Amino acid sequence: MHKVNNIHDALFRETMSHREVAADFLRNYLPDGVLRRIRLETLAIRKDTFVAPDQARHHSDLLYEVRLMSGRSAFVYFLFEHKSAPDRFVALQLLRYMLEIWELSRKQRKARRSLPLIIPIVVYHGRSRQRAVRLGELVDCAEESLGAYVPDFGLAFYDFSPESELRIKGAITLRLVLTCFRAKNNPETVRHVFDIFRLLGRLDDDETSLRWVEVIFRYLSQTMDIEENVMHDAARISLSTAKERAIMTLAERLLNKGKAEGQQAGRQEGRQEGRQEGRLLVLQRLLSKRFGQDVLDIRTQERLRAASPEQLDLWAERILDASRVEDVFGEE
């Protein structure tokens, strides 16, 4: 998974894996007719994930089990779409994951004679607007008489891209997360930072709230292209002393971590350069001993220095059997 999607995925899971946040999302965005048939207080997260590793750079997911008013068990499946551009075929992805959920359900409850209901929810936060495309729309079927053979299902699709008209609502934690997802598409817009900090300012100063302050600030630090002093000014203006102190502490930790990673990368790069230089010196010594000092002219030296470690190793091996210097640098 690409690093940038790790950032978005981490925030999505950090928040939506809390039952109360997931319930708040459903309460604010599912149609009333659906909500009346769901007992939100019974939401329970399942540990299963159905996104294949080769798709993890584009999607992540969360599965909840819930009781219906009828007493039957059902699932709410969140698919979080990372793609920056709209994916017309997201319903096809959903169908694949829903089939896997049903197969798992059959294995776990073999005596059950029916499949549980799945409510598929897509949360999209790309740069451009997107609408839900049902699976039936994707099948090329112009003949009405053949429509009975076309699979189709509804999906709850929520677009949080910058130009979307979908209003951000809910409790503060949910609004923070959704505002962050919309803001990351305009990373240089200071207004978004102040909007987010004003929401943070409405949280209490207890331990749980300070934890959310850290989660949101870490995300902003990694996604928003805002100068550090501007972020600090926004914190000072919008937040209590306790929250501002928490942000400053985290900012210092992130800075120190960045320095440490930079130093580690520098040491590693230095070791790699040292090994490369060692290979080069050995090969130069072998060439001059086998073919004479004159073989190390400027052109050969440049060729050696431009070579990869693998090429240097290959040439060193060829020296053992080469009768001419041309045999060393022959076809690879």
Image (spheres, grey):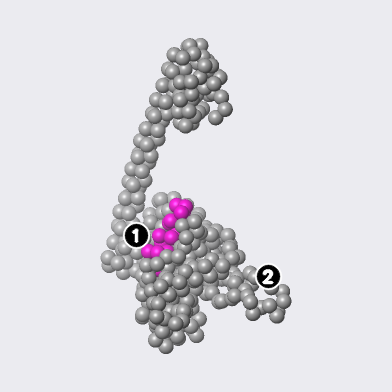
Type of secondary structure dominating the magenta stretch: helix
Residue type at numbered disc 1: Glu
The magenta stretch spans residue 148? no
Label 2: few (<14), some or many (≥20) within 10 Å? Answer: few
Q: Which residue sits at x=31%, y=69%?
A: 204
Quarter of the image where the C terminus is located: top right
Q: Which residue sits at x=68%, y=70%?
A: 140
Q: Quadrant of residue 247?
A: bottom left
Local SS, label 1: helix
Q: Which mark is residue 110?
A: none
Residue type at numbered disc 2: Asp
Residue 197 picture location, percent across and down: 40, 63
Q: Magenta segment, which residues? A: 1-16
Which residue is labeled 1 in the image? Answer: 214
Give the farthest residue toward the right: 143
Which circle's residue, 1 or 2, is located before the other in the chain?
2
Q: Which residue sits at x=49%, y=62%?
A: 59
